[in-house]
Image: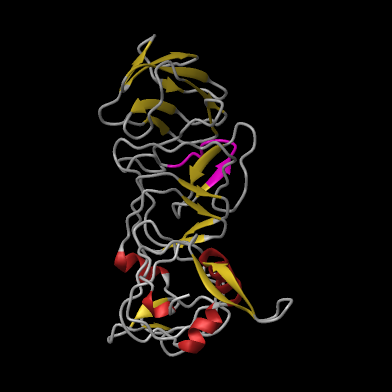
């Protein structure tokens, strides 16, 4: 056998090639045998770990591409370059997160950038309130679902739906609906005393402008041109009962003051002894079947019917 150095080199080398070596632990020992390169490759792969590689040298200048997951149980120090997630990649933060200073965030804090471009907890917009959020942007297209109370002290323009299951307290300002909008009351309605209306009751404003549920429309002035001394309005049943003992008027207000529908009937009963004259305010016409419009006797009864806008027809137990 010639010297090994005199043999030519095989090129290219394949894993099915062989080379000659010594099997140390064979029987008998130190026997010369052929070894497949593929067998040596398998031997190396099963015995060389990443730890072996890192022990030999843990610094590299080449890029590394991984298609599997990396499980990290120790610290991760990234001192140079850029940590980037590709367009189709996802970054999941399953554990706790520390900021640039190595601090963990507390409940409600946000990660924000400081003047040096470092991300830290508890700087800048920490625990953002509603004012800070609205200062960034106060327009949204999603519905708002509130389970608590909403207290509104300024103007509020809403173009979408608001679903609210808690109480709504509106203490200052004006709640208004723009032209073309509407309000739909599907639930029960309470007045300012937090009382639900009874069957047939109506919402009536009091002297302070507060609405309450009442059984009838109160006999109060409906027009600024009228006074309490010359106006008596009908109750919920369309009846006016007067007990006056002096001459007085029952005046019919303008349609703009009390918009009674056409066909409205008001019955006037004189329980007193005075003379009752049924007349209209300025702009209201009152016609009489007999040409008279006075109730002169006690217990006289007359009926006045609305036949057109600001025009009424009077008939009944009336005398000159």
Q: Residue furthest front?
A: 1
Q: Nearer the viewer, residue 105 or 282?
A: 105
Is residue 36 rendered to the left or right of residue 111? right
Residue segment shown in magenta: 212-220
Q: Residue furthest top?
A: 289
Q: Is residue 208 above or below residue 42?
A: above
Between 226 and 14, the residue placed more toward the observer is: 14
Q: Position of residue 111 (x, y in %)?
A: 42, 77
The answer, for residue 106, to whether it is visible in the render is: no
Q: Quadrant location of the C terminus?
A: top left
Residue 207 drawn at (x, y percent): 45, 52
SS assignment for the magenta stretch, majority? loop
Is 14 on the left-hand or right-hand side of 38? left
State yes or no: residue 319 in magenta: no
Tag count: 0
In front of the other: 264 or 252: 264
In magenta stretch: residue 213: yes
Residue at the extreme right: 27
- Residue placed farthest to the left in the image? 283
């Amino acid at each position: 056998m010639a010297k090994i150095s005199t043999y030519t080199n095989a090129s290219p080398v394949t894993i099915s090639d062989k080379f000659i070596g010594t099997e140390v632990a064979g029987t008998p020992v130190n026997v010369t045998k052929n070894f497949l390169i593929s067998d040596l490759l398998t031997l190396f792969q099963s015995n060389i770990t990443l730890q072996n590689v890192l022990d030999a040298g843990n610094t590299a200048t080449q890029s590394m591409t991984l298609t599997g997951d990396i499980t990290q149980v120790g610290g991760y120090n990234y001192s140079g370059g850029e940590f980037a997630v590709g367009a189709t990649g996802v970054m999941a933060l399953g554990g706790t997160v520390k900021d640039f200073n190595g601090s963990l965030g507390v409940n409600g804090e946000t990660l924000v950038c400081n003047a040096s471009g470092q991300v830290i907890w508890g700087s800048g917009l920490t625990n953002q309130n509603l004012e800070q959020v609205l200062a960034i942007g106060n327009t949204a297209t999603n519905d708002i679902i509130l389970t608590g109370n909403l207290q509104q002290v300024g103007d509020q323009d809403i173009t979408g739906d608001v679903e609210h299951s808690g109480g709504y307290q509106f203490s200052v300002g004006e709640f208004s609906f723009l032209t073309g909008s509407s309000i739909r009351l599907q639930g029960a309605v309470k007045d300012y005393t937090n009382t639900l209306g009874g069957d047939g009751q109506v919402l009536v404003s009091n002297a302070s402008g507060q609405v309450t549920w009442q059984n009838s429309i109160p006999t109060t002035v409906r027009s600024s041109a009228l006074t309490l001394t010359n106006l008596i309005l009908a109750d919920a049943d369309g009846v006016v009962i007067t007990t006056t003992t002096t001459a007085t008027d029952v005046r019919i207000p303008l349609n703009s003051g009390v918009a009674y529908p056409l066909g409205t009937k008001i019955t006037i009963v004189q329980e007193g002894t005075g003379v009752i004259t049924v007349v209209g305010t300025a702009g209201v016409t009152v016609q009489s079947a007999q040409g008279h419009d006075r109730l002169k006797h006690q217990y006289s009864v007359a009926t006045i019917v609305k036949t057109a806008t600001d025009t009424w027809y009077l008939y009944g137990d009336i005398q000159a």
